[in-house]
Each structure stands twice: as C-alpha cells, then as structure tokens.
Amino acid sequence: MTQLITDQGFVVDDWATGYAPLAAARDAIAIDVASDAHPDDIPLADSLQMIRVDFPHAADGRGFTLARQLRLRGYTGRLRARGHVIADQYAMVRRSGFDEVEIPDDLAARQPQDQWLARANWKDHDYQSRLRG
C-alpha cells in the first residue's frame, strides 16, 4: 500500500482510475512516467488528468526537472511524485510543480505526518524569502 501526502498531511487517495504506461499515453487520462523520461516525449492531450512521476530513490532528482518542464510546457493537471521521496524534499517537490506525493507505507512509518506537515508551508520557508527579509 501507499500513503498520499499533500499540504494537509496524510490524506486519502481519491484517484480511483489506474495509470497507463507512457507508451500508451495518447488516449489515457492518467500515465506513469519514469524519472528518466524526456518531457517532450510526454503527449499533453486534453484528456490527460494525472501524471505520476517515479522517484526510484531519494538521491534521484530527475523527477524535479521533469515536473518543472511539464509545467513550463503548459500541463495544468495533477502531477504526483511517487516513490522514494523524503519529507526533507517536500518543499522542492512542491516548488518544482508537483501537487502531491505518494510514498510506500514503510517510508510513511519512518517519516510520519508531522515531519511532512513541518514542511507544508513551503511557500514561506525558502532561502529567497529569508534573503529578501
């Protein structure tokens, strides 16, 4: 099982539809994308409502770049980071364009909700805000 995280903390996953692989993305409403995918290879059809980007391990930051590039290309649907994202990365996840994070239950047990909520005010706590003071 997995745990979904938003700015409100641990929430129930309301996405009931499955995910198509990137190869079948043309008519899909939700797709799974590997962290090494090229943003230009992801067709942004009007029917696409959710893109879930895989984070194979916490040290793999390619998903952040992918999210930013998708937003720059005009994608406005739900964007979910899935996999080994840690609470310390939550602000970067949100700033790069993700709406939510899906982590395995074992990771959620090691990084409980309070650790994620401590970073939920990601708009207020960035180095640029502190420098502008």
Image: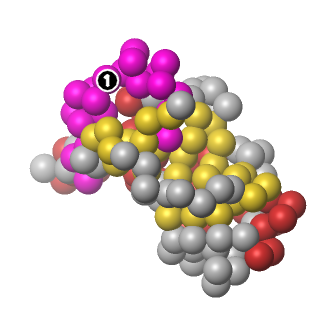
The correct choice, above or below, for 78 with respect to 116 in the image is below
Q: Going by the picture, which residue comes out furthest to the bottom? A: 46
Per the image, the residue denoted by label 1 is 112
Q: In the depicted view, which residue is nearer to us: 14 or 57? A: 14
Name the residue located 53 percent from the left edge and 57 percent from the top edge.
Answer: 16
Q: Looking at the picture, how far across and down is residue 112, in whole percent?
A: 31, 23
Whether the magenta-drawn stretch holds residue 113 is answered as yes
Q: Is residue 67 left or right of residue 25?
A: left
Under mark 1, the amino acid is Pro
State the SS at label 1.
loop
Q: Which residues are magenta?
A: 102-123
Image location of residue 88, percent across then percent down: 38, 29
Residue at x-position 32% and y-position 39%: 10
Q: Residue 18, percent across and down?
A: 65, 56
Residue 15: where, in percent of width, then height? 50, 57
Task: Name which residue lies at 63% across and 49% down.
Answer: 53
Instruction: Note whether 99 is above or below 81 in the view shown.
Output: below
Q: Is residue 62 magenta?
A: no
Q: Quadrant of residue 25?
A: bottom right
Q: From where the camera sits, is residue 44 visible?
A: yes
Q: Is residue 69 above or below residue 72?
A: above
Residue nearer the viewer, 86 or 73: 86
Q: What residue occupies the far left of the structure in this picture?
A: 133
Q: Residue furthest top?
A: 110
